Amino acid sequence: MALSFPPRQLYYGGQVQPASSGKTFQTLNPATATPLADIQIASTSDIDAAIGAAEKAFPSWSQTPPIARARILQKAANLLRERNDEIARVETLDSGKAYTETSTVDVVTGADVLEYYANFIGGGGLNGETTQLREDAWVYTKKAPLGVCAGIGAWNYPIQIALWKSAACLAAGNTMVYKPSEFTPLHGLTLAEVYTEAGLPAGVFNVINGAGDVGAHLTSHPTIAKVSFTGQVATGMKVAGSASGNMKYVTMELGGKSPLIVCPDADLESAVDGAMMANFYSTGQVCTNGTRVFVPRSMKAVFEKRLLEKIPFVRAGPLFDEQTNFGPLSSAVHHEKVISYIRNGIEKDRATLLCGGPEKPNVPQDLQAGYWVKPTIFTDCTDSMSIVKEEIFGPVMSVLYYDTVEEAVQRANTTELGLAAGVFTKDLNQAHRVIDQLQAGITWINTWGESPAEMAVGGWKKSGLGVENGRRGIEAWLQNKSTLVDMSGAVATVFAKL
Ligand code: NAD
């Protein structure tokens, strides 16, 4: 059977390059479980060659004035916006996300970050500081790039993750070798070609393909100065351990099990909408999902009623249909994992199944082989249930009832993870008090999920290290150099003649 896309090769040194391994894997359309393209796997010598190309490009790119780098990045942002629909179409096929989502969020929020950092460095954001010490002495600082960096992507926001990493990395003057997830690799080459068309010099952004072994060779390579990783906690701990042991810089964007606290005075409609978005957007495959929904016991009946009334608005169906807002899960293996959590919730945890369950939802005949799942809500959950403790990364909401807000906050923090958290309340003081007590790096008040370029995002505890985006995001791609200048004409020495 002819595949929808031609075979994908690697990209380094400013051009498409065939992989020397002779091995390929296939990427599938999760809505139908049909193969889309053969992807060539990078051999260790291909990975070394991509790193070599990035190393060769570094001296010139790092010395390119920020304003000139900014122009190229801004042009790349413009090209991405012009091609938004075409790129979003490929993202939908590769990831299974509804086109209503990829065409309005994935490319847009990636291009926004490119534009943000183009403006930031063009406007002097990489300038250092000067401190006058004495009349004839001062200290100045410079922000220097790190060198050749590795970017490793997860499968849930393919091109957005590639852009959130490469935008700040390249703006800071580094070069990058990027490895997309093996489940959603199609965007990699497209992004490399967009950068080249925008004027990015050869070797500044390079793409290799493969699974964990390719990622491991890349991230442990001695030339790599920094590893920016998005993925599961268990993988992140392995990668961070090996990278930081070799004094590489790391940014780790990992998983979560985030709490959403509905206070007794919250606007019911907003709180229910927030909980729905925090669990079912992107079929629940969002790292910041608010999967532990804490609700006052007194609101149990109204909250559950309103959730059930909203569930029919979750519409699975053909991914390019403008009514569809809920796609399949991204792969067979992930589908298996999510379904087994739902079964566990019913059979072992014995939570109350409010709606959903492990059976396949109703989808048209031609989609039935895909990895579809029903939006699922468990209520009467307790803190010790596996569905409440572990990241499922699918459309599975756990509702937990509480008696006092203090109790909800304390229970919300009883987790090793700390990616996101949020509160719904009309009381301004309560909103800030609760947010202040929640142990998470990304928090929302009376909303859920928005992550604009200006907002630095990253997890606390085992959810990660460092942040992406915002002014703080670029600092993670820079190292400081402090210089003390003395114009007194005499070195203060203790080795003078008595
Ligand atoms: P994963 O850890 O299985 O894989 C992530 C990437 O790591 C893939 O590209 C994979 O090939 C690579 N990899 C695997 N083993 C490796 C190794 N030893 N060395 C180097 N690279 C290796 O994660 P996933 O299933 O693709 O992604 C889902 C996870 O990502 C969820 O836990 C989700 O919460 C998290 N996530 C976090 C954020 C965030 O910003 N915090 C954003 C998106 C997704």
Image: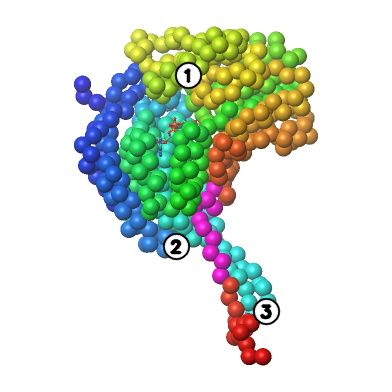
Write the residue at 55% across / 24% down: 390
Q: Earlier in the sequence, mark 2 or mark 3?
A: 2
Write the residue at 48% across / 33% down: 234
Q: Which amino acid lies under the numbered mark 3 shown in the image of this protein?
A: Glu
Q: Earlier in the sequence, mark 2 or mark 1?
A: 2
Q: Is residue 482 magenta?
A: yes
Q: Position of residue 93 (x, y in %)?
A: 36, 26
Q: Position of residue 84 (x, y in %)?
A: 40, 36
The answer to whether residue 217 is left or right of residue 403 is left
Q: Secondary structure at mark 1?
A: helix
Q: Nearer the viewer, mark 2 or mark 3?
A: 3
**Residue at mark 2 to residue at mark 3: CA–CA distance:** 31 Å
The answer to whether residue 316 is left or right of residue 408 is left
Q: Which residue is mark 2?
A: 65
Q: Which image quarter is the C terminus in?
A: bottom right
Q: Nearer the viewer, mark 1 or mark 3?
A: 1
Residues marked 2 and 3 touching at CB (< 8 Å): no
**Residue at mark 2 to residue at mark 1: CA–CA distance:** 48 Å
Write the residue at 66% across / 35% down: 439
The answer to whether residue 408 is left or right of residue 105 is right
Q: Which residue is mark 3?
A: 135
Q: Is residue 447 visible?
A: no
User: Neighbour class for label 2 at 10 Å: few (<14), some, many (≥20)?
Assistant: few
User: Neighbour class for label 1 at 10 Å: few (<14), some, many (≥20)?
Assistant: many
Q: Secondary structure at mark 2?
A: loop
Q: Which amino acid lies under the numbered mark 1 shown in the image of this protein?
A: Val
Q: Secondary structure at mark 3?
A: loop
- Which residues lie in the magenta part? 473-483
Q: Position of residue 483 (x, y in %)?
A: 56, 70
The tag on residue 446 is none
